[in-house]
Each structure stands twice: as C-alpha cells, then as structure tokens.
Amino acid sequence: MRFLADMGVSQQVVEWLRTNGHDLVHLREEELQRLPNGEIFQKAAREQRIVLTLDLDFGETLAASGDQIVSVILFRLRNTRTTFVIQRLEDVLTHSSADLTQGAIVIVEDGRHRVRSLPIRS
C-alpha cells in the first residue's frame, strides 16, 4: 500500500511500514512540515496515497472534499506509544485493507477501529 504520513506520525511507524513492504512518504522527508491539510489531501490524491494522521481536523478536510476519494487512517489514541500505534495499525491493515483501497476513513481508537466508506453521504 502507498501511504503519506502527516507530521504527528513517528519515524518508527514509518520504518515499520517500510519494513513490511509498504511505500511511504513522510511530510518531513520532503520538507513539507507546514503544508496545510487541504494541500496534504491534494498531494495524497495526486500520488494515490492513504493519509496517516493524528490531526483530528483532517476529518473536516475529508468531509469538504466532495467526491474526491482519499483514504485516511485517523488515530484517536490515548496511548500514543510507538509500539501501541504500530499494534493498532497492524490490526487495521489486517482487517480493513480492502476498505482502504476502495476509499475509507478509518478511525483508530485504543480498543477498536471504525470504518466509514467514502464518499460519505448525508
């Protein structure tokens, strides 16, 4: 899978994904630390990447995107230790990879994750 990691995602998570065969770009590696959410979204769309973020405001960016499909994994964790983030991410990738390739927002919490297929209609 192809991922775009937002600034809050640790380098250890990046390395874990790469070790497991995923194509990943971190905003820091491209010196895009200050890129606004809307531009992160556009970059992910152009490069066909799934956004990894801890930024709760990214849900609003996704909601305002209309019919453009960019999958997002949004971490809403109390426990943000790297080993726990990796454990939760591994669970998401094991159980929700198909959803992510079709377009989804996956909200990852300490004890579960929820999947909403895109586009979200009211």
Image (spheres, rainbow, N blue to C red):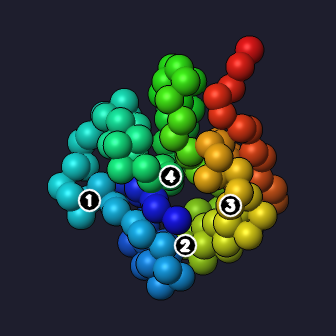
Most extreme residue toward the right is 111
Q: Amino acid at mark 2?
A: Thr
Whole-angstrom CA distance, mark 4 to mark 2, is 19 Å
Residue denoted by label 1: 28
Tell me which numbered mark, 2 or 1, is placed earlier along the sequence: 1
Mark 3 residue element: helix
Q: Quadrant of the C terminus?
A: top right
Circles 2 and 1, Cβ within 8 Å, touching? The answer is no
Q: Is residue 43 above or below residue 87?
A: above
Mark 4 residue element: strand
Residue denoted by label 4: 50
Which circle, 4 or 2, is nearer the viewer?
4
Tell me which numbered mark, 3 or 2, is placed earlier along the sequence: 2
Q: Is residue 22 above or below residue 98?
A: below
Q: Quadrant of residue 110?
A: bottom right
The answer, for residue 17, to whether it is visible in the render is yes
Q: Position of residue 70 (x, y in %)?
A: 51, 40
Most extreme residue toward the left is 31
Residue denoted by label 2: 82
Residue denoted by label 3: 97
Q: Amino acid at mark 1?
A: Arg
